[in-house]
Image (cartoon, coloured by chain):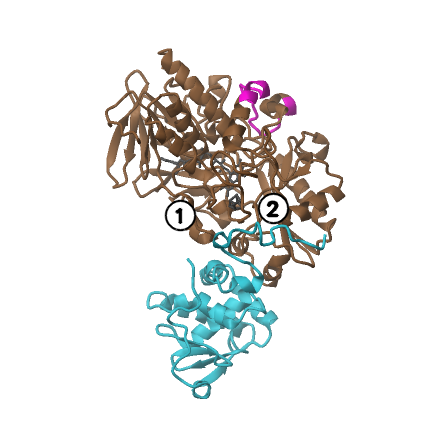
Amino acid sequence: MTQHPKGPALERRGLTRRQLLSRSVAAGASLVVGAGFVASGTAAWALETTAIKPESMATLIQMARDIYPHDQVADQFYAIAVKGYDTAEAAPNVEAGIAELNAAAVAAGHADYISIGWEEDRVAVLRAIETGVFFQTIRSGLVTGLYNQKDVWPIFGYQGESFSQGGYIERGFDDIDWL
Amino acid sequence: MVAKFDLNDDSVVVIIGTGAGGGVLANELAQKGVKVVALEAGGRYLPEDYINDEWESFTQLAWLDARTTSGTWRVAKDFSGLPAWIVKAVGGTTTHWAGASLRFQEHEWKALSTYGAVEGASLLDWPIDAAEMAPWYEMAETKLGVTRTGDRAGLPGNNNFKVFEKGALALGYKEVHTGRMAINSADYDGRMACQQTGFCFQGCKWGAKWSAAYTDIPAGEATGNLEVRERSHAARILHDDSGKVTGVEYFDKDGNLQFQAARIVCVAGNTFESPRLLLNSASSMFPNGLANSSDQVGRNYMRHTTGSVYAIFDKPVRMWRGTTMAGIIQDEARHDPSRGFVGGYELETLSLGLPFMAAFLNPGGWGRGFTTALDHYENMAGMWIVGEDMPQATNRVTLSEATDQFGLKVANVHFDDHPNDVAMRNHAYKQGVAIYEAVGATRAFPTPPYPSTHNLGTNRMSERPEDGVCNKWGQTHDIANLFISDGSQFTTGAAENPTLTIVALAIRQADHIAREMAAGNI
Ligand SMILES: Cc1cc2nc3c(=O)[nH]c(=O)nc-3n(C[C@H](O)[C@H](O)[C@H](O)COP(=O)(O)OP(=O)(O)OC[C@H]3O[C@@H](n4cnc5c(N)ncnc54)[C@H](O)[C@@H]3O)c2cc1C
Ligand code: SF4
């Protein structure tokens, strides 16, 4: 169940930052979408897609953040959490789910999900589909997909494995100083 | 010298399951010279194998075979295939357990007499009492090396405990300490002292916490009287025309069906699997399952009234550092109906790592209400409620239509809270929140019960055969050479974590079985 952030699909591609950005269009606030890939707006990382459309992947990443929004957690980790859906097997359901999500956005008077500017408005769209299978699959997958990334733990202060360091007996198990 | 017994050897005692009940019973019998074959569905994992990672460890150790659920408990909705969080491995759930080791209070052996009849509850008195159990408790405490018993010192308090303690004292609670724990505060019984690693639930890599996996089981094997057959899943207990059990059919590690003959069979598969096995062993002579003339097999399932309270402070706590559950408030464990419920509850420190916190804080929850809680994970403190829940005849394990990998019907677990459980939980939530607010918590989370870790009562002990499944020795009322040896024999649950009592009962049962065998009675 562990997903490691440096998986094969997530890597800086053989393009310069400028080349990458010149081949993409903005999708949402911080993502750009190009032919066959989603990248961060700063081109710090790019995620190649094979089975699902890059626009759908960008929407999925935005949706992941809106379900479990942590402002201190970069998009990269949300991308890692959902990149597993980019398979031939999962693609039809994901595309259908994204279509359902976009339809809900349209019904609420927006162009599509990812172009909604305010999180609050996107969340209202998610509420409209939250009992459905698509939402529940994505949400429950994120519980491990996002929070079980070892590289995410330090962002929350969690220190993970401790045996190899001799436990906390000499590393602050009782160091609270403000009580 | 590890024993190896013949499948046709009908002089052996066969024990099904090697956890707190079965593992201890196996060793105690072996020490007395009784030949034992222990069948264990899981594999063997030792401290060097345990993993300091919540999900990886869960995948390694947890019982993940199919189960189904029904009833109004929230677990049936959020974790429908996982009613319990327990272990499938040599040593059973004593690999996962946190080590809290408390004796029952005297009145808890006599719940019906003390509380009086409670509507909707199938309360009974145990057929044993505190005086009878005292010497067995002492042996169990010595075996487990329980802190604050004998001359064993308490564990030091970690950050999570210090917050908990300060809040408790501010509220006027008096019985507040770092618990009676089966975790070494100093080297004991060849095992080292706790290193405050904080992964007690994942198997203690130092061996500081008692687990049958690396204490009783190897000690029993060393006598030459105990053979543990791992990855051996008991399917059915067979009997002869006189109604005595003759042995156990099981699937071996290669999936082949075997039959091990037995003089005595002891069932210790934990509270879902033990009744399931008795029910799956139905025959033309016993159409409702073995030892079930009372129709009590599977009924009166108890899981303790639980819940957690987590709270956020404006400064770091780092609750995950150090012993997971070394902290307790016992003042609410008394029976005091003026609080609006019978029985009592303990409050114990608890911490989960970030991955489990995300899964259990508010299962199904999402959005900023949820994520802002996790944002302050570092500033969180946590406690767990464990209180006496009411036995109810309708809370029960039955056979589901679903089958497992062997084609055997799986256990369906039905549970509804009793109003007494709800009243107790709400009281405990309120107290838990108040404790943390007294130390300046800025936000508190009364968190719903997890999949059950304490599972009790489905083959209960009773004085009269019509009220339960087994007598005061764990011997089934119907079949003299069939015993119940795990938490399923509990008549009522008491407020305390159950394992010390399971172990004390196993030591006592071993003594009884060996004596009866020697006398030629069974
Ligand atoms: C996370 C956690 C923390 C806990 N903390 C505490 C604590 O602090 N204090 C406390 O008192 N208790 C605690 N407990 C509870 C404690 O672990 C259990 O009460 C105790 O282990 C139950 O003992 P048992 O013998 O009934 O079953 P188990 O220890 O679960 O053993 C049952 C064994 O039987 C095997 N089995 C089942 N069916 C079959 C079959 N058909 N064939 C062969 N083998 C089979 C299983 O694989 C298992 O190994 C905790 C539990 C968990 C999960
Ligand atoms: S905190 Fe202590 S008992 Fe728990 S796993 Fe670490 S060393 Fe073992």
Give the mark, 2 or 1, whose residue is nearer the N terminus.
1
Q: In this rendering, would A177 be left or right of B483?
A: right
Q: Which chain is brown?
A: B
Dominant secondary-structure state across the stretch colored magenta = loop
Q: Position of residue B20 (x, y in %)?
A: 46, 33
Label 2 crowd bin: few (<14), some (14–19), many (20+), radius 10 Å: many
Number of residue marks: 2
For marks 2 and 1, give the CA distance: 29 Å
Q: Nearer the viewer, residue A63 or A32?
A: A32
> Which quadrant contains ligand 1?
top left
The secondary structure type at the circle numbered 1 is: helix
Q: Position of residue B206 (x, y in %)?
A: 47, 44
Is A178 a magenta residue?
Answer: no
Q: Position of residue A168 (x, y in %)?
A: 56, 51
Residue at mark 1: B49
Q: Range of the magenta residues?
A: B114-135
Amino acid type of disc 2? Answer: Ser
Q: Nearer the viewer, residue A170 or B168?
A: A170
Residue at mark 2: B308
Q: Position of residue B483 (x, y in %)?
A: 40, 23
Mark number displayed over residue A119:
none
Find residue B372 and report its image quarter.
Answer: bottom right
Q: Which chain is cyan?
A: A
| Disc 1 C-beta below 8 A from ligand 2 | no
Name which residue lies at 61% across and 35% down. Answer: B153
Q: Nearer the viewer, residue B165 or B40?
A: B165
- Front: mark 2 or 1: 1
The answer to whether residue B89 is seen in the rendering is yes
